[in-house]
Every structure is written in C-alpha cells, then in structure tokens.
Image (tube, rainbow, N blue to C red):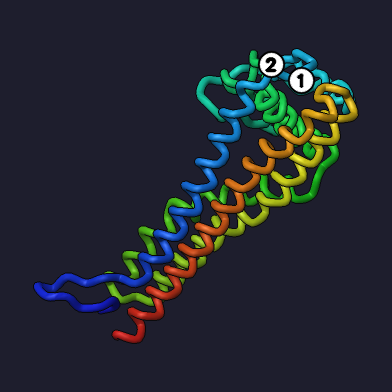
Amino acid sequence: MYGYGYPYGFYFDPTYVLLIIGMILALAASGKMKSTFARYQQVRSHSGLTGAQTAQRILNAAGIYDVTVVPIAGSLTDHYDPRTKKLALSQDVYGRTSVAAVCVAAHECGHAIQHNVNYAPLNIRSAIVPVANIGSSLSWPIFLLGLILSIPALTTAGIVLFSLAVLFQLVTLPVEFNASSRALKMLESTGILSHEENAGAKKVLTAAALTYVAALASSILQLLRLIILSGGRRRDD
C-alpha cells in the first residue's frame, strides 16, 4: 500500500499534493480570464464594431471568404471549426461592441487564418484529436484497473494513453499563442482597435492564453502522479 498510515486503516496519498497544485493553477487561470474578460466587456471599442462584424472584417482583410460567422449559445464557447469552416461566436461576443468581444472574435479569426495557410501545429493538433480523446477518456480506468489487479502492463498503458492527452495540450499552446499574435496584428492593421486599446487587447488575450498554460501544467502534474503511483505499487509488490 502506498501512502502514510493512520489509525483505523485510513491512508494519505502524498501525490494528492500534485493534484491540488494542478487544480489551484487551473482555477487561478480561469478566474483571471473571467475577471479580465468581464472588465473589458464593459469597455466599448472606439470602432463600435460587434464581434461578428469584427470577424467578418478580419476574414475579408485576410482574403478568406468561405468561412461563415455564426452565433452560438453559452459564454466563452467561441471556436472555429475547420471541418465546416464555421466561426462560432458566443452571445457575449457575437453582437457586443466591447474590447473583450472584439478580441475574442479576432482570436478565433486567427484560427481561421491558420487553417487557410495550413499552419503546421494546427494540422498536427487536428490529426491527434481522436487519439487524444481516447487517451483522456480511457487512461484513468485502465490505469486504476492495472493498480487493482496488479498488472503493470495495464498501468503502463494508462500512462501512455494519458500522455497522448498531454501531448494534445502541448501542441495546443503554439496554436493558441499564434492565433492571439495574429489577432493583435489584424486588429491593428485593420484599425478595428486604436493604439490606446491595444494594451487592453493584450491583457484579454494573455489571460486567455494562461488558461491553456495552466491546463498543460495541471495535466503534466497528473501524469507525474500516475508515474509515481505506478512506481509505488510496483515497489510494494
């Protein structure tokens, strides 16, 4: 048995510390993103363009005319789907004229531009989506089954599957940072945001990027926890 013994058979697993650190990082990044978005959601852009109008102007400026901008329910559910070439903007972005709405719309346009120019990291991320989904859904059940039955091959398989999910998040980082970089350049070159508004735009996009950094850090810590637990069980055996 791994962990430290307590009376009446209770044990403390020290690897929970890694899990707690990961949760704190994710919550902190999410909180920062939401507070920054809420702050600049109250600031109207000088151009007066809505998120949808912003997206359309940037796409046209980039020479992209086959992407459809559509509304989608929810908050911060914005995304670009390369399969259908649809750029979906949430209710807080699609019809809003705030700096935050403009930034989010521009960021999603960044993904559409990546797709249009065959940006390699985006293609790699799209290619590993199926295996990453399998890895994230099956890794823990297989790993726990391996621990319970004391079958090292299963615990190793669980670790490998979880590594695929971590790989997906690792590839996601350059994709997201590049999309934000493209967004800032397009917002400036098209005159959608003034020079004074660029500082706010950078804060919104940086806060969004931090959520992906935190997610990767959290996943790496979970992967480390799996490795430690697997090694501890093998020593006990």
Image quarter of residue 6: bottom left
Give 58 or 97, whichever is nearer the viewer.
Answer: 97
Amino acid marked by disc 1:
Thr
Return the residue at label 2.
97
Q: Amino acid at mark 2?
A: Thr
Q: Could you say whether the residue bearing mark 1 is in a helix, strand or loop?
A: helix
Q: Is residue 103 above or below residue 219?
A: above
Instruction: Reply above or below: 114 against 237.
Output: above
As drawn, is 198 to the left or to the right of 209? right
Residue 127 horizontal/vertical position (percent): 67, 48
Tell me where residue 224 appears, x and y as whole percent: 48, 69
**Rendered location of residue 1, percent (x, y):** 25, 79
Residue at 88 percent across and 24 percent down: it is 190
132 is higher (above) or lower (below) than 53:
below
Residue in the picture at 33% in, 79% down? 233
Label 2 CA crowd tier, 10 Å (few <14, some 14–19, many 20+):
many
- Between 46 and 116, the residue placed more toward the observer is 46
- Asked if residue 123 shows in the view, the reply is no
* Disc nearer the start of the sequence (1/2): 1
**Label disc, if present, on residue 89 of the rendered structure:** none
What residue do we see at 66% from left, 49% from top? Answer: 172
The picture places residue 91, in percent across and down from the top left corner, at: 57, 18
Instruction: State whether residue 92 appears in this view.
Output: yes
Q: Quadrant of residue 17?
A: bottom left
Q: Which residue is mark 1?
A: 54
Residue 122 occupies quadrant: top right
Distance of label 1 from label 2 (alpha carbons)? 9 Å
Most extreme residue toward the left, as rendered? Answer: 8
